Image: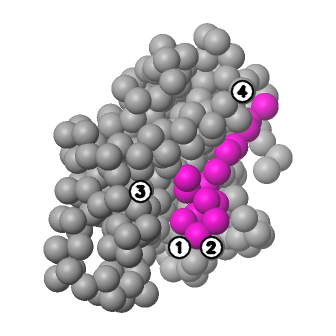
Amino acid sequence: MGDDRSYFLGVDGGGTSCRAALALPDGTVIGRSKAGAANIRTDLTGARSNIIEAAQMAFADAGVDQALLDRTPAVLGLAGANVGAYARQLKELLPFAEMLIETDSLIALEGAVGSGDGAMAILGTGTAYLSRAGEVVRSVGGWGFLVGDQGSGARIGRDLLEQTLLAHDGVRPASPLTQAILETYGNDPRAIVEFTTHAKPGDFGGFAPKVFSHAVRGDAVAVQIIDRATRAINASLDALRLRGDAPLCLLGGMAEQFAQRIAPRYRAALRNPLQDALGGATSMAVRLFGNGARTDD
């Protein structure tokens, strides 16, 4: 089995790690691996190195000769592929026989709903939304914490700190939640401000579980924050223009929390994901490059 259609590679690369899976023509995965981060916008050179390492490790895990790497077609879903010319630059640096470089959101959609119509919402530290209807793929959000990510864990945490400071200043009523946060910082609002100086989205997102737990108890500030996040999520889902029969998958660390909070029409469309993003990349590779199929990308 040495021709370029014997194996197919899927890669899922993000800001934390890069995973790869090697599959046979029938889609059976025979090798898996994990390497370092592969966000091509923040570190193109490092991403290239980790992608190749992950691919080689997947071949090794499958017991397949790594010399076949440059004869194997691949689909790569990578963070940072949605902006700039990074994907095109990377394509010139990789050894695969044929390849399609897409966003990590698109392979997550493929994994969640398969190759047909459907939509997904990634609800975690950040937020992103994607739908497919026929050949039309629609993306909403995914612009990052500073200018986007409405309804995300990071924005929920930021809102909590904002409300805590407003309560301290007497602008808004305090609540058990804002009092607890202020006490965490020694009742010193300046300590909260100092925290925000170097905090990353994940640091803000660390407050989200506390907001959810207090919302369940009826804390007024927590309920307000979660309601605002839910409205933002519903608005983004509205922008996807889903058909009535299209399946919807919620992914990410807050998926379970929002599954019962989103609008009824979206709750009715919820389905469990078929597989994860890496599975989506691998399935795409087999679907797009198998059986003599070709892509010009």
Q: Position of residue 191 (x, y in %)?
A: 29, 86
Q: Residue at x 32, y 46 (%)?
A: 220
The residue singled out by tag 3 in the image is 156
The span from disc 1 to disc 3 (Cα, nearest Å) is: 30 Å
Q: Residue furthest front?
A: 170
Q: Secondary structure at mark 1?
A: helix
- Disc 4 to disc 3, how far (Cα)? 25 Å
Q: Residue at x 78, y 42 (%)?
A: 295
Q: Amino acid at mark 1?
A: Ala
Give the residue type at disc 3.
Ile
The residue beneath circle 4 is 241
71 with respect to 83 (left or right)? left
Going from N to C along the chain, the mark reached first, 1 or 3, is 1
**Which residue is disc 2 drawn over?**
41
Q: Position of residue 35 (x, y in %)?
A: 37, 67
| Mark 1 nearby-residue class (10 Å; few <14, some 14–19, many ≥20) | many
Label 2 vs label 4: CA separation?
Answer: 29 Å
* Mark toward the viewer: 4 or 3: 3
Q: Is residue 234 magenta?
A: no
Element on which disc 4 rests: loop
Disc nearer the start of the sequence (2/1): 2
Q: Is residue 122 left or right of residue 138?
A: left
Q: Residue at x 51, y 24 (%)?
A: 263
Q: Would residue 223 be found to the left or right of residue 132 on screen?
A: left
Q: Is residue 131 above or below residue 206?
A: above
What residue does disc 1 label?
47
The magenta stretch is: 136-150
